[in-house]
Amino acid sequence: MPLLPTLSARRQRNLTYGLFLLLPVILFVASYLYPIFYTFNLSLHDWDGLSPRQRFVGLDNYTSLLSQPRFHHAVLNNIAWLAFCLVVPSLAGLGLALLVDGKLRGESLFKLAFFVPYIFMPVAVAAIWRWLYLPDGGLFNTVIAKLGFPEQMQNWLGDPAIVNLSVMLAALWSGTGFAFIVFLAGLRNLPYEYLEAARVDGASRWSIFWHIIIPQLWPSTILVVGIFGIDAMRLFDIVWSMTGGGPSRASEVLATQLYDVAFGQFKMGMASAIGICQLLLAALLILPYIIYITRRVEELSE
């Protein structure tokens, strides 16, 4: 007799667990899987976004896209942005965190100054830096002229040779605050006894930094590198707000090209193909990092 109530209670418990899991599964399918499958299906069609019928073209959008120099240039720009975001803001944030953690006077003021740019909307950041970059009357060219080097004045957002570096500088100013806060929190949580023992043993500052601080900052590094990597692959707003992908598409990335093809040329099938290629490129570049991080976490937990 006790067996029946036990089975009934077990079924009820499993049903409860299943109902709690059902909502996240539905949200995941509706928010992630369905849009991906819908976009892939749309990429196999020729559609202007307005007509009621879509013409099936198979892989023509992909073959056409892969033969376009414009697409190749956007891919290279995305890869350049990925390399930049993974290295420069991360190191800058770590450097600032080390500076502030060294008992710097006016610490609160520095924290505010370093972090505030991160909370600005990218459109606001773009507006500020477009003013700084103005060829006539912009802060940078004005300072260069006042210093007596008028021949070094630049058309910062109008020269294809330097436009990407100019936009990256604006992104560095706004994005470093995130890495700074994360690394500073990691530094403040370092085991004090490790540092003190290393100092007692006569270890140099460089040795302490490389062999104790860096390994202990591993969780912070995982977070910073992961967020910056994802942001680099879906980059759109600051580039579009500052240059629109110009001049002559020199600063164009995949997201800005997708927007232009979809809403400028009304080629929804081609734009969907760009989106799928962007997803595949992100997976190709980021999945190895996720696999590596997973293995490292498992090793540390053992």
Image: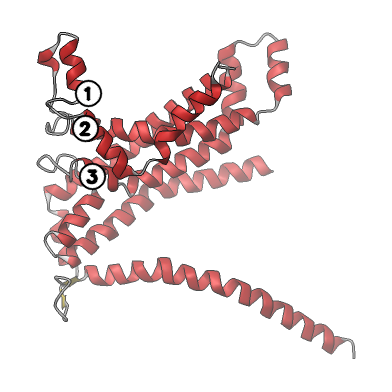
Is 101 placed above or below 122 here?
A: above
Tell me if label 1 and label 2 are in contact, CB under 8 Å: yes
**What crowding class fits label 3: few (fewer than 14 Cα within 10 Å), some (14-19), or many (20 or more)?**
some
Nearest to viewer (mark 3 / mark 2) = 2
Q: Amino acid at mark 3?
A: Ser
Q: Position of residue 34 (x, y in %)?
A: 38, 71
Q: Left or right: 253 with respect to 2?
A: left
Cα–Cα gap, marks 1 and 2 = 8 Å
212 relative to 167, above or below: above
Look at mark 1 in the image and give the residue it sits on: 139
Q: In the rendered image, which quarter is residue 6 located in?
A: bottom right
User: Label 2: which residue?
Assistant: 131
Residue under label 3, please give it.
241
- How far from the left and from the top, in percent, is residue 193? 74, 22
Task: Please rate how many residues cluster around mark 2, counting C-alpha atoms within 10 Å: few if below 14, some from 14 to 19, many from 20.
Answer: some
Residue 87 visible in the picture = yes
| Residue sitting at x 55%, y 47% | 294
Q: Quadrant of the C terminus?
A: top right
Mark 3: which secondary structure? Answer: helix
Q: Secondary structure at mark 1?
A: helix
**Residue 76 visible (yes or no):** no
- Among the two numbered marks 3 and 2 on one chain, the one whose residue lies closer to the N terminus: 2
Q: Is residue 213 left or right of residue 287?
A: right
